Amino acid sequence: MHNSSAAPEMEVLSADACWDLLREVSVGHLAVLVDGHPEIFPVNYKVDNGALVFRTGEGTKLAALAGDAAVALEADGTGGEPRRAWSVEVKGRAVVLEPSPDLMRGVGLVLFPWQAGPKDHFVRIVPRSVTGRRFVVTSPLTWWNHLDDAPRADLA
């Protein structure tokens, strides 16, 4: 099955537009390497001085962020014109921050994890690249094929 109609336009977003969209949502998907394999964790974040900050507790995610870990965070959303969606990706390095009064007065004051439990570690994603795109969401009917019309193998 495939879409036989012409593909709708996809808009490549500027870095400024990406940051604006990242401020509109608070949940993204963080990709890290764990024992040489990719793992993805949902995190809620805040934009802070040209970077992303999130809180986490002890565990696999924090261990994977030790050192100068390469990470990617992807966030999506819809809005604006009807049937428009967007996706933004931030690639960079994770830095585990030392708690400080400045941190707690700033982004720490408004960053509330969704999951209960100790979340005593703050992590900053220092971006190396910020890319995004906006596109029209295609109607599910575009992809629909009736089973009667599908090719079949003779099982006799």
Image (spheres, rainbow, N blue to C red):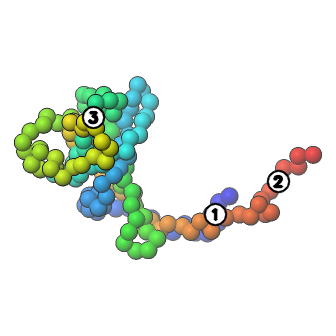
At x 88% / y 49%, what residue is drawn? 154
Q: Find the distance from the CA under tag 2 to the CA under tag 1.
A: 18 Å
Residue located beneath label 3 in the image: 57
Q: Amino acid at mark 2?
A: Arg
Which quadrant of the view contains residue 81? bottom left
| Front residue of 146 and 111 | 111
Q: Amino acid at mark 1?
A: Trp
Which quarter of the figure has residue 69? Answer: top left
Give the x, y percent position of residue 43.
Answer: 33, 45
**In the drawing, does residue 5 fall left or right of residue 19?**
right
Foreground residue among 91 and 41:
41
Which is in the foreground here, disc 3 or disc 1?
Answer: 3
Q: Residues within 10 Å of mark 1 (few under 14, many from 20)?
A: few
Packing grade of label 2 (10 A; few <14, some 14-19, many >=20) is: few
Residue at x 56%, y 69% (from the top left corner): 139
Which sits in the foreground, 82 or 130? 82
Disc 2 versus disc 3: distance between alpha carbons? 52 Å
Give the structural element (helix, strand or loop) at label 3.
loop
Residue at which label 1 appears: 143
Label 3–label 1 contact, CB within 8 A: no
Identify residue type, mark 3. Answer: Gly
Residue 41, percent across and down?
A: 38, 41
Q: Earlier in the sequence, mark 2 or mark 3?
A: 3
The label number, if any, that marks residue 152 in the structure image = 2
Q: Residue furthest front?
A: 116
Alpha carbon separation for disc pair 3 and 1: 42 Å
